[in-house]
Image (cartoon, rainbow, N blue to C red):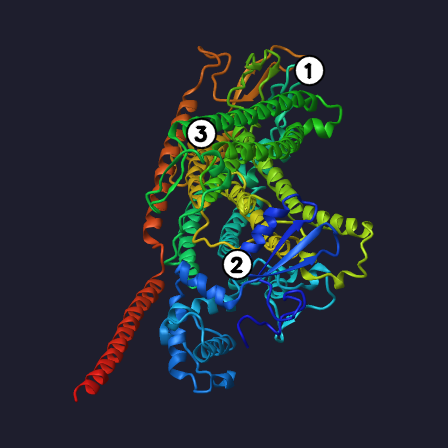
């Protein structure tokens, strides 16, 4: 068949003649006033060799579709002008076929094709059906006169693009998941790419299977293919992290009843604690917080340090092995030697600086440019806007802190005994929920501000615009999401003061204190609630919102009185037009969600070892949600090439470094690991013994509580206890820090230094050991380079032999 004709194409993918394939579709409104410009544009398209056909919409009388077909000759012409290089592995396949192809190419038998093994040319094997298509096209090329008369190797890339159908934004038929046709469309006896993606990727029943990355890349392009490859790789790497985190949690669960600290708190029926608030609060018994102490042990136990080190190493291994996986994908997708061409300027940039030109050092042509002073002033305004929004985040966190102080007094003196006993749970829980609502509300504002500031900078190209916007969105949402978490981890209870000399906010509200068993449970609760609620909200916005939008569009069509008997009768372009377009930010929102989740999984993982497990469960759902959304709810986006995930890789590396620092401070400052460690080795009953176990912490709770003289209260209690290392009121220097306080402080600082240097050293050593490219891939690339040189040598030798024979014949005719 002629390459311009597709007789097996389904209805809706060809022109009215049923032969010419639709390569692209333009849409415009008939009521638009740009009639003359549109006619000129269409006339220029025809002048360049494209074929156009107009089709009115059946669902909206104001919409007109312009179907575009690119003929074979036009593809050949522009392939020459653009110097598109055919993939080398494709050249090797053609070379093998050239030596095998029979004399009558139009009678090829698919079963008669030779088996091309991996070892034959060190390349990925082609399917027999694909080789049959290639042989037919190659044979057709040899038998048919073309307008391009050069060697076959310089032109077959157009055949390759025609076969692979990369770069065609027109959707390929329908699928049962969209309810637009009761039967899946088949092409030449096989399901089309769109239906295959739905069957093998977007269905929920496929959650346990690998993603068809080659098919995703073929239909959506390399940029989206790399995103799903990275998401799948990240999800797979979460499996060992989730298993280790679950083991650490189970260790805390099984040792909860045997914990010496929990035992002492639960048995401290006679230990009277100082009141938690200034008004309406009375002294309380330490044993009342028994449940709180046991829950704290689930996350603050001996496995915390090990898991923090493990996750720091895991983050490095994840990024290093992703580099290897990316190298394999770029090789398989023929992107190794691909370099981004000089990007075209954004229209907004050209319109703004059209009067200022200078010569481009690469192209040598004059183009608009942005003066340094103008760029610097706009950048300063943008940075000022970023700091203003960050200050707004800190203001919101401060408001939440004030709420915690007010709620603490009310819950500590609540009339219900259950709430009064668990006032810290109640305070933290309500504050987290309010904080989450503030976070999600501010995210909407941040997106608009980031968009405004990025446009204010006037980036030169689209990639610069996308990187600038992505960085702003990450900074805004990272600070918005983690600022309250940082407060709880490093500031909660650190500046509360002591009984008789409490520090108060605005001289009214007493600052919040930590529980006698530590502040880690507050941090854990904060992370758990925000992580779960945010994942639920994101999943709803990713799938639920587009579903509601598409449902509303179909409802408006039905109410519009359109004379459409059934959706099955609608052409494919009408069905796709009624879907939602991909958001203007591209993949920024998709990457941003996963990168923020990566931060939650690594930065404070010492406080919440179940974070990798929650991330794993969410990502299993996320992959299918994104797949279903891309295939069924969004219009097919414009395919684009890419060799990496862009700016997000640098952000992930920065998060990995920050995770080491934060986990060191969480273990040293937030948890009670260091105070327990100092007590066991310096003050406990096992100081003179050669072993360390849970019994060595006997008396730790009494050692970590100081004494305050209240005077005689209504119940006859004179002394109360509070969490600190201070001298008793009867000492020579009452309420001064004890020697144990300085020992704990020194141990904390020493642990931070040792932990950071140890983990950074291990990370650097692992990064050095893992090469960015697998050895077998390097061998395959060297093998291809060798074969390329050999092929070029043979082609040159063949050319010289032809020239020698030609010159020999001329010499023979001239001799008489």
Circle nearer the viewer, 3 or 2: 2
- Callout 3 touching callout 2 (CB < 8 Å): no
Mark 1–mark 3 Cα distance, whole angstroms, equals: 65 Å
Residue on which the image places disc 1: 715
- Callout 1 touching callout 2 (CB < 8 Å): no
- Callout 1 touching callout 3 (CB < 8 Å): no
Residue 53, image x and y in percent?
A: 63, 61
Q: Nearer the viewer, residue 368 or 620?
A: 368
Q: Is residue 31 above or below residue 384?
A: below
Element carrying mark 3: helix
Circle nearer the viewer, 1 or 2: 2
State the mark number for residue 47.
2
Lateral position of residue 184 relative to residue 37, left or right: right
Residue on which the image places disc 3: 379
Element carrying mark 1: loop
Lateral position of residue 325 relative to residue 757, left or right: right
Q: Quadrant of the N terminus?
A: bottom right
Q: Nearer the viewer, residue 621 or 358?
A: 358
> Disc 3 or 2, which lies upstream in sequence?
2
State the mark number for residue 163.
none
Q: Nearer the viewer, residue 260 or 279?
A: 279
Element carrying mark 2: helix
């Amino acid at each position: 068949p002629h390459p311009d004709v597709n007789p097996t194409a389904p209805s809706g993918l060809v022109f009215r003649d049923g032969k010419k394939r639709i390569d692209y579709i333009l849409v415009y409104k008939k009521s638009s006033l740009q009639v003359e410009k549109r006619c000129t544009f269409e006339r220029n398209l025809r002048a360049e060799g494209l074929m156009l056909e107009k089709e009115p919409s059946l669902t909206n009388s104001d919409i007109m579709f312009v179907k575009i077909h690119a003929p074979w000759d036009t593809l050949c012409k522009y392939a020459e002008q653009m110097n598109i290089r055919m993939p080398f592995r494709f050249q090797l396949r053609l070379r093998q076929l050239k030596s095998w192809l029979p004399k009558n190419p139009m009678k090829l038998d698919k079963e008669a094709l030779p088996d091309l093994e991996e070892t034959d040319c060190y390349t990925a094997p082609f399917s027999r059906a694909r080789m049959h298509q290639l042989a037919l096209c190659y044979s057709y090329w040899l038998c048919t006169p073309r307008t391009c008369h050069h060697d076959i190797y310089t032109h077959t890339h157009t055949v390759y693009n025609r076969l692979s159908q990369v770069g065609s934004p027109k959707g390929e038929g329908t699928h049962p998941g969209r309810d637009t046709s009761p039967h899946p469309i088949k092409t030449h006896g096989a399901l089309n790419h769109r239906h295959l993606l739905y069957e093998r990727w977007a269905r929920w029943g496929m959650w346990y299977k690998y993603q068809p990355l080659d098919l995703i890349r073929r239909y959506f392009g390399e940029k989206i293919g790399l995103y799903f490859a990275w998401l799948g790789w990240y999800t797979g790497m979460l499996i060992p992290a989730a298993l280790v985190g679950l083991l650490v949690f189970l260790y805390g669960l099984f040792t909860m009843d045997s914990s010496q600290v929990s035992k002492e708190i639960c048995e401290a029926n006679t230990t009277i604690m100082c009141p938690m608030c200034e008004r309406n609060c009375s002294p309380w018994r330490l044993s009342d917080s028994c449940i709180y102490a046991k829950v704290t042990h689930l996350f603050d136990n001996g496995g915390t340090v090990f898991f923090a080190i493990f996750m720091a190493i895991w983050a490095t291994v994840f990024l290093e092995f992703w580099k290897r996986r990316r190298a394999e994908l770029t090789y398989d997708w023929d992107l190794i030697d691909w370099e981004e061409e000089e990007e075209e300027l954004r229209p907004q940039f050209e319109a703004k600086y059209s009067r200022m030109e200078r010569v481009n050092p690469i192209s040598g042509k004059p183009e608009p440019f942005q003066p340094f002073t103008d760029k610097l002033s706009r950048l300063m305004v943008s940075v000022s806007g970023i700091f203003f929004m960050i200050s707004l985040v800190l203001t919101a966190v401060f408001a939440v802190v004030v709420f915690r102080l007010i709620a603490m007094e009310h819950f500590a003196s609540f009339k219900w005994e259950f709430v009064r006993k668990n006032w810290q749970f109640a305070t933290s829980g309500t504050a987290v929920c309010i904080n989450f609502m503030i976070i999600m509300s501010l995210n909407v504002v941040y997106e608009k501000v980031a968009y405004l500031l990025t446009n204010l900078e006037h980036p030169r190209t689209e990639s610069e615009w996308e990187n600038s916007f992505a960085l702003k969105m990450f900074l805004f949402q990272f600070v918005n999401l983690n600022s309250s978490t940082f407060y709880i981890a490093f500031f909660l209870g650190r500046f509360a003061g002591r009984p008789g000399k409490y520090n108060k906010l605005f001289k009214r509200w007493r600052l919040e204190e930590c529980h006698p068993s530590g502040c880690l449970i507050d941090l854990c609760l904060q992370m758990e609630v925000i992580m779960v609620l945010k994942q639920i909200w994101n999943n709803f916005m990713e799938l639920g919102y587009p579903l509601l939008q598409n449902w509303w569009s179909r409802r408006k069509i039905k109410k519009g009185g359109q004379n459409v008997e059934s959706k099955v009768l609608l052409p494919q372009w009408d069905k796709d037009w009624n879907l939602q377009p991909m958001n203007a930010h591209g993949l920024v929102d998709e990457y941003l969600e996963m990168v923020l989740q990566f931060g939650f999984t690594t930065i404070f993982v010492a406080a919440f070892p179940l974070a990798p497990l929650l991330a794993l469960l969410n990502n299993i759902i996320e992959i299918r949600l994104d797949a279903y959304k891309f295939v069924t709810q969004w219009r097919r986006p414009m395919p684009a090439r890419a060799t990496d995930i862009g700016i997000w890789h640098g952000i992930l590396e920065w998060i990995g470094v920050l995770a080491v620092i934060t986990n060191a401070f969480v273990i040293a400052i937030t948890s009670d690991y260091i105070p327990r460690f100092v007590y066991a080795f310096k003050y406990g009953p096992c100081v003179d013994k050669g072993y360390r176990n849970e019994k060595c912490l006997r008396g730790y709770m009494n050692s970590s509580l100081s004494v305050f003289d209240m005077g005689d209260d209504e119940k006859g209690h004179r002394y109360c206890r509070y969490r600190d290392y201070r001298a008793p009121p009867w000492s020579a220097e009452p309420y001064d820090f004890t020697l144990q306080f300085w020992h704990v402080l020194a141990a904390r600082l020493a642990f931070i230094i040792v932990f950071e240097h140890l983990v950074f050293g291990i990370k650097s050593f692992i990064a050095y050991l893992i090469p960015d490219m697998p050895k077998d891939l390097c061998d395959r690339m060297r093998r291809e380079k060798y074969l390329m040189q050999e092929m070029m040598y043979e082609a040159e030798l063949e050319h010289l032999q032809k020239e020698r024979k030609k010159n020999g014949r001329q010499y023979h005719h001239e001799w008489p």
